[in-house]
Image: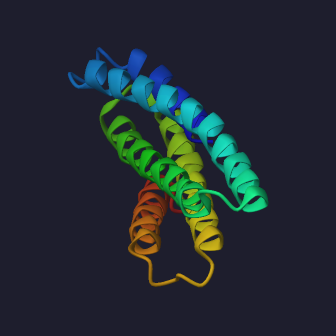
Amino acid sequence: MVAAAAALLEKSARLSGKQWDGAAAALERAHALRVESFELIEEDAQAYLAFVEAVRSQQDVETAHARTVDVPLRMTQAAAEVAELAVQLASHGNPNLRADAVVAATLAAAAAESGLTLISVNLGDAAGDPRVGAARQMARKATGLALSLRPRDS
């Protein structure tokens, strides 16, 4: 979801150069976030598989378990950043592409909430872990940003 949201922002930024001086920087950041997010998809799958193998072999379980939290945390962070960038593009970018920025923020918020869910589940009884709090803060921020862009009657 984060990669799709970032791709929407790339499109919006690419076509917003006339409206906003910051469009080129937004395009560069959206591209970097899309690439990073694609990499995190594979990294997340590998982290889970490594954890399953570590549990089976009883070797490096703590390290493998930590990756099942750290990767979704990085996904949540990227999602929150995409939501922030979406607000900038919705406000300053090409008005014909404002809806793309709104959809990007909505997707990013959903991805951030999803990351929070994965982190919470993967930490289980460690609810006091600061990574849960950090993920919750990023997810709530992304959700608030997405909601701020939606039309009042929706």
User: Total marks drawn?
Assistant: 0
Does residue 19 appear in the picture of this structure? Answer: no
Residue 116 in which image quadrant: bottom right
> Where in the figure is residue 12, as x and y percent of width and height?
45, 25
- Quadrant in which the N terminus is drawn: top right
Q: In this view, does 99 lie above or below 138?
A: above
Q: Is residue 150 above or below residue 38?
A: below
**Residue 94 as seen in the image, left or right of residue 60:** left
> Where in the figure is residue 152, as x and y percent of width and height?
51, 62
Of the pair 87 and 25, the residue shown nearer to us: 25
> Where in the figure is residue 55, as x and y percent of width and height?
73, 61
Of the pair 30 and 48, the residue shown nearer to us: 48
Q: In this view, does 102 lie above or below 140?
A: above
| Residue lying at 37% horizontally and 45% vertically, measured from the top left | 87
> Where in the figure is residue 138, as x and y percent of width and height?
41, 62
Residue 19 in which image quadrant: top left
Q: Is residue 45 above or below residue 119?
A: above
Does residue 13 appear in the picture of this structure? Answer: yes
| Residue lying at 29% horizontally and 18% vertically, measured from the top left | 24
**Residue 67 as seen in the image, left or right of residue 29:** right
| Residue lying at 59% horizontally and 57% vertically, measured from the top left | 60
